[in-house]
Image (cartoon, helix red, strand yellow):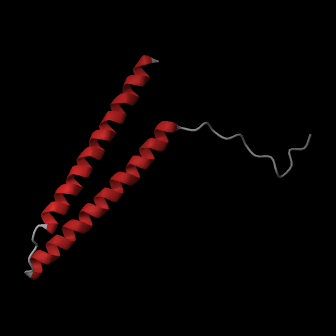
Amino acid sequence: MDSGPLARPPKPPFDRERFVFKILAVVIGTQLLIYSLAAGVCGQRALEGRSIGQICPGTLEQLQGGFDSTLKLLLALLGGAALSRMDR
C-alpha cells in the first residue's frame, strides 16, 4: 500500500500542562507590558510637571493586584502539578 502525499503523521497527544503554562506566560507578559506602559505614562506626566492626581496611583495599584493574583495562580498550578506527579 502506497502512503501517498495525503498521509499525515499521527498527532501527538494534547499536553494540557504545557498549554496552561504557555497561556500563563502570555498573560504575565501582557500584564508586564501594560504595567510598564502605565508606569511610563505616569513617569512622563511627572517629568512634565503635570498633575498626576488619583489616576496613576489607582491604576498602578490595580495592575499590581492583578499581577500578584496571577503569580499566586501560577504557584498554585505548579504546586498542583507537583502533587499530581507525586501520586503516580
Where residue 66 sits in the image (x, y, percent)?
26, 51
Residue depicted at 38% across the width and 50% down the height: 25
Give the quadrant of residue 30. bottom left
Q: Is residue 23 left or right of residue 37?
A: right
| Residue furthest to the top | 87
**In the depicted view, which residue is nearer to us: 58 or 43?**
58
Residue depicted at 17% across the width and 56% down the height: 61
| Residue furthest to the right | 1
Examine the rendered structure and indicate whether residue 32 appears above or below residue 37: above
Where residue 67 sits in the image (x, y, percent)?
26, 50
Give the quadrant of residue 54. bottom left
Examine the rendered structure and indicate whether residue 41 appears above or below residue 13: below
Q: Is residue 66 left or right of residue 11?
A: left
Residue depicted at 30% across the width and 37% down the height: 75
**In the depicted view, which residue is nearer to us: 62 or 31?**
62
Residue depicted at 34% across the width and 56% down the height: 29
Q: Is residue 10 left or right of residue 56?
A: right
Examine the rendered structure and indicate whether residue 83 appears above or below residue 21: above
Tally of numbered tags:
0
Examine the rendered structure and indicate whether residue 40 appears above or below residue 27: below
Give the quadrant of residue 41. bottom left
Where residue 10 sits in the image (x, y, percent)?
71, 40
Q: Give the quarter of the figure containing the N terminus.
A: top right
